[in-house]
């Protein structure tokens, strides 16, 4: 979710070119990072301890990608130790003790489940059950982290480009990139997936000596986590390859479906926005949008009304904010002014 | 996404009890369905043809659950015909021609892939590859539809209760239900999942004559779509049961993980909202929130500023709305009034 920040930054820089200042007051935008009249009150104490919203997002919604990798390593480590200890209670084609244990963990956690190695005692069966659930949750966690990470990395790159080259042409290109972000993500992912499929097929035909059709069949059976098990990785080299390839390719296919869903959601969202934007404003709307009942609709009243109509915000998002506004509006004028803030500040000290 | 409508309705009815009208103008809410001064202009034509936002949502974001079922039936029908025609090119334990074909489809589409029935020719292998991808997409589609459907059904029930019993006690209970909606959904799902596990285990011990541990192992291996294949449904009765049970239980586990993720997202979202709400308003904020630069912050300006800070809305949501506002504000007064609407109406005719 940290891409929210990057998005804001991009838009902020892009604003002048994206919309010329035609109409007076209605055309102002919420400004950030402007210097404020802080001349008669010292900088508030909590302003430095509680970071601004950008840090709030990166701290709360984006625990690092490294954390996920660490948990994965821990999971595989514990799995390798557990299953190499009970090696004799697993039946099937074996190569190397530790390698087989890791391979078994990967095949289990991704739910590929070839069945070329299967638990053969009560203890190992229950152990496998425990490992598949935790592994599944972990893959899901890893999947969401990967998605966030990829997006963030790409947008950080965009922002970097923006700072280096501030020409209008570049800006417009970047804006175009940004509006088609979901589409680009989808195609990058598709490219990566095709590459992984190709690599898998080449490996299976060369090392595991499968025919072309069988290699394709095994690749499909693996990346979809189907894992019939009639074709799988039986050699030592194959299993080393499989450990890395299975994890990346299954996660890549997961991301592919995720981005596909995102693409369709975005398309739907866009058509709603279009519908709401093109619908004519009627007198009924005018009265409904008139938040403060002064018989006219200001720009912010209009925006709130339309955002609600688009389904972007809900009534329950608004209610607590209205309560807070009332608390801040010390003189009950229906407006927060500098004097309200000052009074509030004096009250709280 | 159709639950958006239900949510609005609930909140609308709950409003009087949820927040007493203390402060004058600042405390008004955006009202819907109020009668408007349409006395000197006839009801606009497009008002009936373009439905209000509630219908917009149900039409665009919520193609019916039945549609998903129909596609599923079609998929299984085509699959049953295809695989029963190439019956001899599938090896493994067989029972009934059509039943095995459907069972094979279900085991493939859910990516369980036991491997008790495997394609044995180039044609069937490629067919299986095609079926697993379409099946996977279909299960994903079905999953999202189920999630929407369950939520909608539950909320329709809430609204119904609300209309029958309008006592304050009931209202408060329903409000409490609504705020913990994600949690309730999660627990309902967990209950359903445990029931499906129990049913599966009972069936496997009774009909497939597995031991208790093996039954548990087979259930876990199936619902997680692991499907090692050393234990699977081998009898005719078992496969009939499997067709229904595998599909519902894998989707149920998928929903379980979905709701788990939703629960954690909601918790994060809540802590952001709390952080933004408790952060003190400074002079910097005051100036940043002052949309129309009149040196005071109105309630709608405040709400927009805070929603942006919470990350609920982005700058790109606001920009097109500002453009539309400018177009509607015919006299460029910075406010839309009845006269603007009337002029716009006359212009367009």
Image: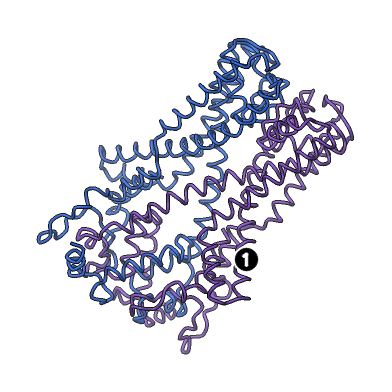
Chain colours: A blue, B purple
Work out which residue is located at the far right of the displayed protein and give it. Answer: B96
Task: Specify the quadrant that holds the C terminus of chain A.
Answer: bottom left
Q: Residue at x 44, y 39 (%)?
A: A148
Q: Position of residue B342 (x, y in %)?
A: 41, 82
Q: Position of residue B43 (x, y in %)?
A: 52, 82
Q: Position of residue B320 (x, y in %)?
A: 39, 61
- Which quadrant of the structure image shows residue B49? bottom right
In the displayed structure, A237 sits above or below B286; it is: above
Work out which residue is located at the far left of the displayed protein and give it. Answer: A40
Q: Position of residue B2 (x, y in %)?
A: 58, 61
In the displayed structure, B7 sits above or below B118; it is: below
Q: Is residue B172 left or right of residue A222?
A: left
Residue A213 seen in this snapshot: no
Q: Label 1 crowding class (10 Å Cα cut-off): few <14, some 14-19, many 20+?
A: some
Nearest to the observer: residue A157 or residue B107: B107
In the displayed structure, B244 sits above or below A232; it is: below
Q: Which residue is mark 1?
A: B156
- Which quadrant of the structure image shows residue B21? bottom left
Q: Residue at x 71, y 46 (%)?
A: B195
- Which quadrant of the structure image shows residue B60? bottom right
Q: Is residue B158 left or right of residue B293?
A: right
Nearest to the observer: residue A223 or residue A196: A223
């Amino acid at each position: 979710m940290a891409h929210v920040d990057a998005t804001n930054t991009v838009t902020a820089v892009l604003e002048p070119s994206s919309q010329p200042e035609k109409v007076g007051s209605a055309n102002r935008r919420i400004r950030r990072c402007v210097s404020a009249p802080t001349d008669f009150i010292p900088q508030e104490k909590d302003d430095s301890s509680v970071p601004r919203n950008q840090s709030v997002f990166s701290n709360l919604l984006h625990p690092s990608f490294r954390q996920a990798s660490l948990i994965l390593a821990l999971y595989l480590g514990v799995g390798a130790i557990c299953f190499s200890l009970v090696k004799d209670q697993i039946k099937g084609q074996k190569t190397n003790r530790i390698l087989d244990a890791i391979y078994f963990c990967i095949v289990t956690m991704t739910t590929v489940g070839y069945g070329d190695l299967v638990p053969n005692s009560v203890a190992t069966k229950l152990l496998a059950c425990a490992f598949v659930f935790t592994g599944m949750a972990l893959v899901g966690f890893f999947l969401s982290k990967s998605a966030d990470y990829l997006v963030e990395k790409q947008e950080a790159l965009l922002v970097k480009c923006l700072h280096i080259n501030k020409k209008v042409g570049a800006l417009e290109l970047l804006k175009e990139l940004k509006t088609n972000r979901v589409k680009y993500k989808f195609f990058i992912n598709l490219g990566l997936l095709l590459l992984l499929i190709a690599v898998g097929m080449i490996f299976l035909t060369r090392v595991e000596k499968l025919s072309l059709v069988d290699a394709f069949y095994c690749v499909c059976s693996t990346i979809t986590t189907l894992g019939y098990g009639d074709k799988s990785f039986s050699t030592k080299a194959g299993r080393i390859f499989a450990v890395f390839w299975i994890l990346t390719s299954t996660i890549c296919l997961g991301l592919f479906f995720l981005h596909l869903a995102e693409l369709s959601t975005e398309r739907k969202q866009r058509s709603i926005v279009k519908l709401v934007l093109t619908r004519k404003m009627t007198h009924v709307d005018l009265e409904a949008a008139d938040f403060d009942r002064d018989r006219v609709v200001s720009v912010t009243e209009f925006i709130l009304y339309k955002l609600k109509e688009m389904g972007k915000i809900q009534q329950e998002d608004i209610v607590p904010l209205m309560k807070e506004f009332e608390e801040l509006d010390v003189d009950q004028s229906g407006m927060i002014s500098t004097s309200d803030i000052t009074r509030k500040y004096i009250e709280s000290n």
